[in-house]
Image: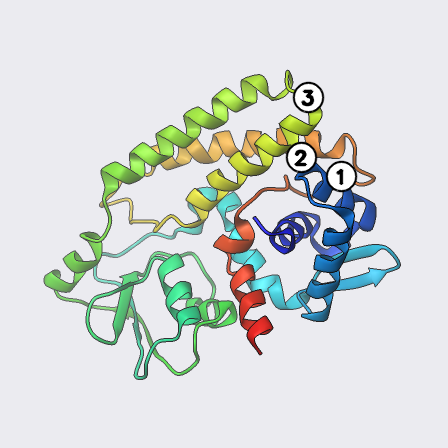
Amino acid sequence: MKATTLIIDLLRTYQERGADVKTIMDTGKLFDYSENLMRVSLSRLVNKEIVVKLQRGQYRLSNTTNPINEFAERWRLGEDRCKPWPEDSWICVHIPLALDKRSRWVLNINGLRQVSDKLWTRPDNLNLINTESFLIKMGLTENIIFISSASLSEKVKNQWFEQFDTRTLDQEYLDMQSKLTKSLDRLNTLPLHQAKKESFHLGGAAIALLANDPLIPIKRHSPKNRIKLWKTLKTYDQRGRYIWSLSSLSRPNTTPTSGLAAMSGLTKMQTTQEAM
């Protein structure tokens, strides 16, 4: 994990109000980063306009990251991320030109899969006001043909369903719930720095699992194990938030967690901008 990734993951949890520089430096020290490296990394993120300086010693993520943050935080909605699904209703995205890496990432992470040369699809069960706008704000190219409530042949429908192993998904839910439960039992017994690091890494892995879920319609896959994991993670998030507030000047809105910068594309944004 790079220092820039750590800063992004940390600031994401403080949302609009941001975090003070002492909290940022202390978090770097927790993960064995020198203060000099943390300050250089913070300065680099400010120069790239991924992080903005609110006032002296206070920083937050820039507004350009809002759509990505919105996606990363949707796990909190649980099953409200989905809407009732008529089986003949599908989302289709036709890409007339070569697909860039960013667009491919946006489609994949939102559960769309390629079913022909230039066509991507998924069941139209995402509970979004405007799915096309949501995808474009996340970074999908605007040079697309977007179709909602599409009707597909059984062959094409099965192409999408066959790309997911529901038994593996269920086992991942159960394994992660078990890890969270065991961690909850021991967090209060650990030294504070160890408890922070464990909640940071494990919480991030659990959130990434839920955020990346393809949300297969309930008619084809029961969400009961996903719901169990979601309920456990909500409890874990509350515990982690408390732990992280014990030695901080301000309490984070959510538990600082690892991996979300990479999962949500913020590190991809950073890499793209650094190449410019």
Corner quadrant of residue 120: bottom left
Asked if one can make out residue 110 in the rendered structure from this viewpoint, the answer is no
In the picture, the disc for residue 191 is: 3
Q: Which residue is mark 2?
A: 241
Q: Which residue is mark 1?
A: 251
Closer to the camera, 145 or 47? 47
Closer to the camera, 112 or 256? 256
Q: Residues within 10 Å of mark 2 (few under 14, many from 20)?
A: many
Closer to the camera, 240 or 158? 240
Q: Residues within 10 Å of mark 3 (few under 14, many from 20)?
A: few
Q: Decide: marks 2, 1 in contact (CB < 8 A)?
A: yes
- Marks 2 and 3, the one that precedes in the sequence: 3
Image height of 97 relative to 65, above or below: below
Element at label 2 = helix
Residue furthest to the right = 56
Q: Amino acid at mark 3?
A: Pro
Q: Position of residue 121 (x, y in %)?
A: 27, 65
Left or right relative to 194: residue 95: left
Q: Amino acid at mark 2?
A: Arg
Residue visible at 49% across and 46% down in the picture: 75
Q: Decide: marks 1, 3 in contact (CB < 8 A)?
A: no
1 vs 3, front mark = 3
- Marks 1 and 3, the one that precedes in the sequence: 3
Q: Residues within 10 Å of mark 1 (few under 14, many from 20)?
A: some
Q: CA distance from mark 2 to mark 1?
A: 7 Å
Q: Amino acid at mark 1?
A: Arg
